[in-house]
Image: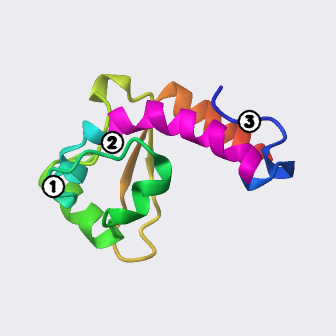
Amino acid sequence: MTTLPGAEFRSAAELLPWQQARWSEQRAHVAASAFYRDLWDGRAPPADLRDLPELPVSDKAQLRVAQAEAPPFGTYLGAPETSVARLHRTSGTTGQAMNLALSARDCRITEEVGAR
């Protein structure tokens, strides 16, 4: 599991090494996403999580376009489609429903975070 027990009671300084280690794993998935490579003009995700704010952020309109161009999950999917264990579809209350792909690991984490 990638959640940290008791994280809600830890200081930012205590969390940073743990967050950095998780980012070191996650950045490979972000680098695999055509969407983020385009958004970031080919720049690689930074090694240090604290440098992430230097890159532009995406918005929901961009994600909608990416999903329309490459259904069902869009070009921002950072893992192989074969790893998708669950499809979640948003309600579309903001104008258009979106498909969200979750791996089995994503589902476990979502359940744990929701339980907190």
**Relative to 98, residue 79 above or below:** above
Which amino acid lies under the numbered mark 3 shown in the image of this protein?
Answer: Leu
The kind of secondary structure element at disc 1 is helix
The kind of secondary structure element at disc 2 is helix
Which amino acid lies under the numbered mark 1 shown in the image of this protein?
Answer: Asp
Query: Which quadrant is the N terminus positioned in?
Result: top right
Q: Residue at x 76, y 44 (%)?
A: 14
For residue 52, which quarter of the picture? bottom left
In the rendered image, which residue does mark 1 sit on?
38
Q: Residues within 10 Å of mark 2 (few under 14, many from 20)?
A: some
Q: Residue at x 72, y 38 (%)?
A: 112
Dot label at residue 30: 2
Give the magenta part as a residue range. 13-30
**How far across and down, in percent of the image, does residue 102 sit?**
46, 37
Q: Residue at x 49, y 54 (%)?
A: 50
Q: Point out the tag, 1 or 2, that comes first from the N-terminus.
A: 2
**How far across and down, in percent of the image, does residue 7 sit?**
78, 44
Query: Alpha carbon of mark 1 to alpha carbon of mark 2: how far?
Result: 11 Å
**Residue toward you, 94 or 35:** 35
In the rendered image, which residue does mark 3 sit on?
4
**How far across and down, in percent of the image, does residue 48 sit?**
45, 45
